[in-house]
Amino acid sequence: MDHQVLNMTSFSIAHLHKGGLHVRAMDAATKPQCFPEYGIARVDETTSNIDHLNDIAAQGAVCVAEPGTCARPSHLGHSSIFMCNQLDHPIQTMCVDLINATTALSTACRFGNDYTYGYLTNTTWGSDSYPYVVALGDDYAFGSH
């Protein structure tokens, strides 16, 4: 069965690693890391982004991240979900694989009742497995605002 590849905006992640705080995907930080490196996101908009991921996942969509980028499969207002690839080759996974990670982040990492943030490591499925980072935040973390 052929799957539709989701067209996603991508951002360079080079500047996110200068301070050394960010855990590289290869370090296997599978628990939510509640640091606002990717910005902070509104909880209500994050819920809508997760709903959007559910909609595209139901269509069998594939999410792809190019080397050294964070691809953005869902964005609304001041909330973005990112799939970040720190490897030197493109990676892909079924978009449905981002949902549990995003939900876990939104639940674990809160700033009051209005904001959520953070990241964790996930792994692609298939004959070759590769680590990648799922992050909640906002585009301004990449200098786009």
Image (cartoon, rainbow, N blue to C red):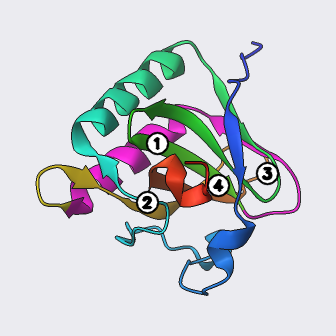
Circle 4 crowding by C-alpha within 10 Å: few under 14, some 14–19, many from 20: many
Q: What residue type is labelled 2?
A: Gly
Count of numbered circles in the view: 4
Circle 3 crowding by C-alpha within 10 Å: few under 14, some 14–19, many from 20: few
Numbered badge on residue 84: 4
Q: Distance between the residues labelled 4 and 1?
A: 12 Å
Q: Tell me if 116 is positioned left or right of 78 in this view.
A: left
> Residue 129: image x %, image y %?
72, 54
The residue that mark 3 highlights is 128
Q: In the structure shown, which secondary structural element does the residue marked by tag 1 occupy?
A: strand
Q: Tell me if 138 is positioned left or right of 117 in this view.
A: right
- Quadrant housing residue 19: bottom right
The residue that mark 1 highlights is 80
- Residue in the picture at 72% in, 57% down: 130
Q: What residue type is labelled 4?
A: Cys
Q: Tell me if 13 is positioned left or right of 114 in this view.
A: right
- Residue in the picture at 50% in, 41% down: 98
Check whether the beta carbons of the residues at disc 4 and disc 3 lie within 8 A of each other: no
**Magenta stretch?**
86-110
Circle 2 crowding by C-alpha within 10 Å: few under 14, some 14–19, many from 20: many
The residue that mark 2 highlights is 39
Q: Does the magenta stretch include residue 89?
A: yes
Point out the frontmost of discs 3 and 2: 2
> Residue 117: image x %, image y %?
35, 58
Which circle's residue, 3 or 2, is located before the other in the chain? 2
Q: In this view, does 103 lie above or below 36?
A: above
Which circle's residue, 4 or 2, is located before the other in the chain? 2
